């Protein structure tokens, strides 16, 4: 079919405007999404100017582009939520698009509800995923999947929160670590003490059955000498244990290739309820199934009470302990090279056997209370009591400040006692009669095993000025003797962090946009102030950029702000343009960072919507001649004025709501009279509505 003038114009504008995007590096931007956004915006401008007969063809083109962009944006929010937010269109840009297109474009959203945080453990491949789901407070109970730029380690299942972010379908993108985009309305309670009432539900898929018997699973959980009940009773020093029941197996209407772990749990709940089981009697639910299409070894809700845990290897006792550890609010036991690399703790790798929790995890649960934790800041010789058993008021954990990362070193002495009699010596490592050096708990929330000290071996950290030597141990008394030297930490320079708000701003050609930059100095506390310079490093040709102020002097741990102004030249085609700022230490080359943002250039081509609400068309002027004139007017950008004319003559100019005035038509000639209202927006677009009244 022959192309119309409007379609040809659209394609020529797109090709010319994309030259900048193709020639520029992408940085955090996605060039394909940028290109589609530009085509949609330029098509939108042509759509609004096109004759009525051509609009449907243009709309069809724009809808196709928007559908392709939506697919890319949905993939991006799940894999890289920061880049998704960078490309999200501002509300006023979305509002300028035809209604049919808006349904395919992300939107700003603010919603509150109950949060579920689930740890998905792919232990055999050394990786995990944290899943966030929000069920809204509304009567309709909508479910959203939350995607953070950096996992917020403080959010736990069962918390009531309010989020402000960008939504596309049922996915919401949120700023780094949650930050101001998340407000906790009420924090979840996580029970780490007393008897935990647990129910274990065994489930078979249609094509796969659990290889362990229900009796075996019950014994492993509750009654064996090496049961999960006995394990937690020992590792918590009698403060937590499990009591409960095991039911099943129930066959659920799913195949083993499915991935709906929530659906499996709900189906098992329904099956148990149908046989008379009262689920309300239990605060811990454990679902035992076979390996399945999820690739994961198990799942565990992070914190909260009640909670859920999923076990896909019925014969791995430490997997039960691991997922229930997530229920208690524990994250992973890692090493610098492996997320599950700390084999001294069940929160590390599974399929090793039961062994007690490491020192920082016992402190997190308060099973080692603060009275048995000593913070060391000076050199000396220290005694460390056995971590596996309490010994009066003796010190079980030593903490040493790790100032370069705002963490602590945690020292715990391990000996082959109780579950650790066999669990501490495996093919993966021997932790018997050693002092373990962990760091905890930074941005990841995981504990990190850094050193395993035997008599005569040491751990040295010149960055923080810390040296730890195990000089000896007493197996009878269950203590280790440590020589700790603290020389004072030298200055450690870390890259500053920067936040830009908004990430995506919009304005028309010939206007200015402002972005707020918040810069935080992440150097260690003993460092001096740093002066950072700010400059635009990526900007379209011919554009201007200024920072106010253009440099910031910031102390370690403190923050500073600057306003970044972008001048959009006249004549710039509608489109999405990546920009970037460079933040540099004026005295230390390489000590800096970058900040990405997006400019959405948009020429407002959408006319206002206007209607006459009073008087009614065809009505008669009252005998006293008074006519009340009321106008309804709205615009995607904003109304600048409304002009009211009587028979073509200007009667009033209204600049703010309510758009209302009166006319005394007592002296008007007999017959019909036209009252017309014309609404204008900032771009000069206008629309009119009129009624006829009779004198």
Image (cartoon, rainbow, N blue to C red):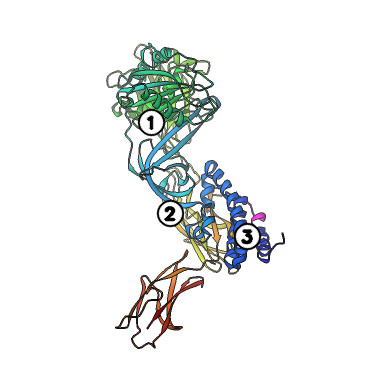
Residue located beneath label 1 in the image: 329
**Percent position of residue 584, x then y:** 53, 52
> Can you tell which mark lies on residue 560?
2
Foreground of the two, 654 or 82: 654
* 283 falls in the magenta region: no
**Percent position of residue 346, x then y:** 44, 22
Is residue 662 visible in the rendered image? The answer is yes
Is residue 538 visible in the rendered image? The answer is no
Disc 1 vs disc 3: which is toward the camera? 3
Dot 2 alpha-carbon crowd within 10 angstroms: few under 14, some 14 to 19, many 20 or more: some
Establish if 495 lies above or below 359.
Answer: below
Residue located beneath label 3 in the image: 57
**Percent position of residue 660, x then y:** 36, 74
Would residue 374 be found to the left or right of residue 635 on screen? left
Establish if 12 lies above or below 477.
Answer: below
Q: Do the residues under discs 1 and 3 have CB atoms within 8 angstroms?
A: no
**Percent position of residue 373, x then y:** 33, 27
Please report the bounds of the magenta region as a residue range: 20-26
Cα separation between marks 2 and 1: 34 Å
From this viewpoint, which residue is outermost toward the right? Answer: 2
Which circle's residue, 1 or 3, is located before the other in the chain? Answer: 3
| Image quadrant containing the N terminus | bottom right
Dot 3 alpha-carbon crowd within 10 angstroms: few under 14, some 14 to 19, many 20 or more: some
Cα separation between marks 1 and 3: 56 Å
Establish if 25 lies above or below 477.
Answer: below
Would residue 273 be found to the left or right of residue 257 on screen? left
Which circle's residue, 2 or 1, is located before the other in the chain? Answer: 1
**SS for callout 2:** strand
**SS for callout 1:** loop
Foreground of the two, 608 or 229: 608
Foreground of the two, 341 or 372: 341
């Amino acid at each position: 079919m022959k192309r119309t003038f409007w379609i040809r114009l659209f394609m020529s504008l797109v090709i010319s405007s994309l030259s900048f995007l193709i020639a520029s590096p992408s940085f955090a931007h996605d060039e394909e999404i940028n290109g589609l956004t530009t085509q949609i915006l330029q098509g939108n401008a042509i759509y609004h100017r096109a004759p009525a007969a051509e609009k449907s063809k243009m709309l069809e083109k724009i809808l196709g582009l928007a559908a392709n962009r939506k697919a890319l944006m949905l993939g991006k929010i799940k894999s890289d939520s920061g880049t998704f937010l960078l490309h999200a269109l501002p509300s006023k840009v979305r509002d300028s698009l035809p209604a049919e297109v808006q349904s395919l474009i992300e939107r700003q959203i603010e919603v509150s509800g109950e949060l579920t945080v689930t740890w998905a453990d792919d232990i055999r491949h050394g990786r995990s995923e944290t899943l966030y789901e929000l069920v809204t407070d509304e009567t309709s109970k909508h479910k959203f999947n939350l995607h953070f730029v950096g996992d917020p380690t403080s959010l736990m299942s069962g918390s009531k929160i309010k989020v402000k972010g960008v939504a596309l379908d049922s996915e919401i993108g949120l700023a780094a670590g949650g930050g101001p985009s998340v407000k906790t309305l009420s924090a979840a309670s996580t029970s780490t003490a007393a008897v935990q009432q647990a129910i274990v539900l065994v489930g078979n898929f249609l094509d796969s059955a659990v290889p362990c018997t229900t009796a075996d699973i019950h014994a492993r959980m509750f009654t064996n000498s090496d049961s999960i009940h006995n394990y937690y009773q020992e590792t918590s020093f009698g403060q937590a244990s499990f009591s409960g029941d095991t039911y099943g197996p129930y066959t659920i209407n799913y195949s083993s290739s499915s991935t709906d772990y929530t659906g499996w749990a709900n189906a098992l709940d329904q099956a148990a309820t149908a046989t008379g089981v009262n689920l309300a009697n239990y605060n811990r639910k454990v679902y035992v199934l076979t390996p399945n299409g999820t690739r994961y070894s198990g799942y565990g809700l992070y914190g909260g009470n009640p909670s859920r845990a999923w076990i896909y290897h019925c014969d791995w006792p430490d997997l039960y302990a691991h997922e229930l550890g997530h229920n208690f609010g524990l994250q992973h036991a890692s090493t610098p090279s492996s997320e599950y690399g700390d084999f001294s703790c069940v929160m590390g790798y599974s399929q090793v056997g039961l062994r007690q929790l490491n020192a920082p995890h016992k402190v997190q649960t308060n099973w080692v209370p603060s009275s048995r934790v000593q913070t060391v800041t000076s050199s000396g010789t220290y005694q460390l009591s056995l971590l596996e058993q309490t010994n009066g008021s003796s010190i079980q954990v030593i903490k040493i400040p790790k100032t370069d990362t705002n963490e602590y070193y945690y020292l715990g002495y391990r000996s082959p006692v109780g579950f650790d009699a066999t669990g501490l010596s495996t093919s993966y490592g021997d932790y018997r009669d050693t002092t373990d050096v962990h760091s905890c708990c930074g941005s990841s929330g995981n504990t990190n095993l850094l050193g395993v000290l035997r008599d005569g071996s040491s751990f040295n950290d010149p960055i923080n000025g810390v040296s730890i030597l195990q000089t000896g141990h007493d197996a009878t008394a269950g203590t280790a003797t440590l020589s700790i030297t603290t020389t004072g930490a030298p200055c450690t320079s870390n890259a500053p962090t920067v936040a830009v708000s908004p990430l995506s701003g919009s304005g028309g050609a010939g206007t200015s946009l402002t972005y707020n930059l918040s810069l935080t100095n992440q150097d260690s506390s003993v460092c001096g102030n740093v002066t950072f310079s700010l400059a635009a490093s990526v900007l379209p040709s011919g554009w201007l950029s200024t920072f106010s102020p253009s440099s910031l002097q910031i102390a370690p741990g403190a923050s500073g702000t600057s306003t970044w102004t972008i001048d959009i030249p006249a004549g710039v085609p509608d489109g999405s343009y990546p920009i970037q700022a460079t933040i540099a230490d004026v005295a230390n080359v390489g000590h800096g960072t970058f900040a990405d943002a997006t400019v959405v250039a948009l020429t407002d081509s959408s006319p206002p919507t206007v209607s006459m609400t009073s008087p009614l068309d065809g009505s008669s002027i009252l005998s006293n001649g008074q006519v009340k004139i009321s106008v309804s007017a709205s615009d995607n950008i904003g109304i600048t004025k409304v002009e009211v004319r009587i028979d073509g003559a200007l009667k009033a100019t209204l600049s703010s709501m309510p758009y209302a005035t009166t006319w005394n038509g007592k002296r008007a000639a007999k017959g019909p009279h036209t009252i017309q209202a014309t609404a204008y927006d900032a771009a000069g677009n206008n629309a009119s509505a009129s009624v006829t009244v009779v004198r």
